[in-house]
Image: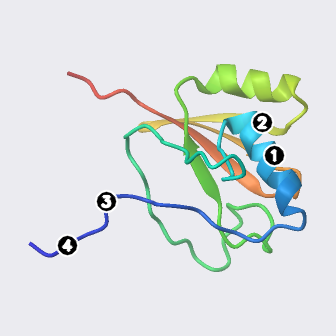
Amino acid sequence: MASRISGIGGIFFRAKDHEALADWYEKHFGINSMKTGYIWDQEAGPTVFSPFAQNTDYFGSDQQQFMLNFRVNNLEELVANLKKEGVKIDEKIQNESYGKFAWVYDPEGNKIELWEPLEPED
């Protein structure tokens, strides 16, 4: 069998104020930006890789070329905490057959999808 990748090793993107944005992601999501030398060790779980049509409005702004999707364990609790911390929240929560979704925005206006996958049934 041919070699394949084993997961996403990093996400790199441009920012207007990269240091402030790195601090925001660390504060609200616990994702370290390498400033302390720590590498984020994420939990194993499902990952979706899906190119979208160029004219999609799913990402919010047509200037946003990609959207982060983070797996979460308790969507409602996280959204409530983010709201208390002053994070811009899309008020809708969407329930699908494969999990719950909510959307928030970082300080530069990037739409972020939060996904609580359904637990597999035994």
Q: Counting residues from the N terminus, which is met first, the one under dot 1 or under dot 4?
A: 4
Q: Which residue is mark 2?
A: 27
* Element on which disc 2 rests: helix
Tell me where residue 15 appears, x and y as whole percent: 82, 67
Q: Counting residues from the N terminus, which is met first, the one under dot 4 or under dot 2?
A: 4
Q: Counting residues from the N terminus, which is met first, the one under dot 2 or under dot 3?
A: 3
Residue 98 in sight: yes
Q: Counting residues from the N terminus, which is met first, the one under dot 1 or under dot 3?
A: 3
Question: How far separated are the C-alphas under marks 1 and 4?
Answer: 36 Å
Q: Which residue is mark 4?
A: 3
Residue at 25% from the left image edge and 70% from the top image edge: 4
Q: Quadrant of the C terminus?
A: top left
Residue at 57% from the left image edge and 23% from the top image edge: 74
Relative to 64, is 84 on the left or the right? right
Is the Cβ of the residue at disc 2 closer than 8 Å to that at disc 1?
yes
Relative to 46, is 21 on the left or the right? right
* Element on which disc 3 rests: loop
Question: How far separated are the C-alphas under marks 3 and 4?
Answer: 9 Å
Tell me where residue 95 appears, x and y as whole percent: 55, 33
Q: Which mark is residue 61?
A: none
* Element on which disc 1 rests: helix
Picture quadrant where residue 68 is located? bottom right
Residue at 65% from the left image edge and 43% from the top image edge: 31
1 vs 3, front mark: 1
Q: Which residue is mark 1?
A: 23
Colour convention: rainbow
Q: Nearer the viewer, residue 84 or 44?
A: 44
Picture quadrant where residue 12 is located? bottom right
76, above or below 111, in the image? above
Q: Which mark is residue 6?
A: 3
Q: Which amino acid type corresponds to the residue marked 1 in the rendered image?
A: Asp
Q: Which amino acid type corresponds to the residue marked 3 in the rendered image?
A: Ser
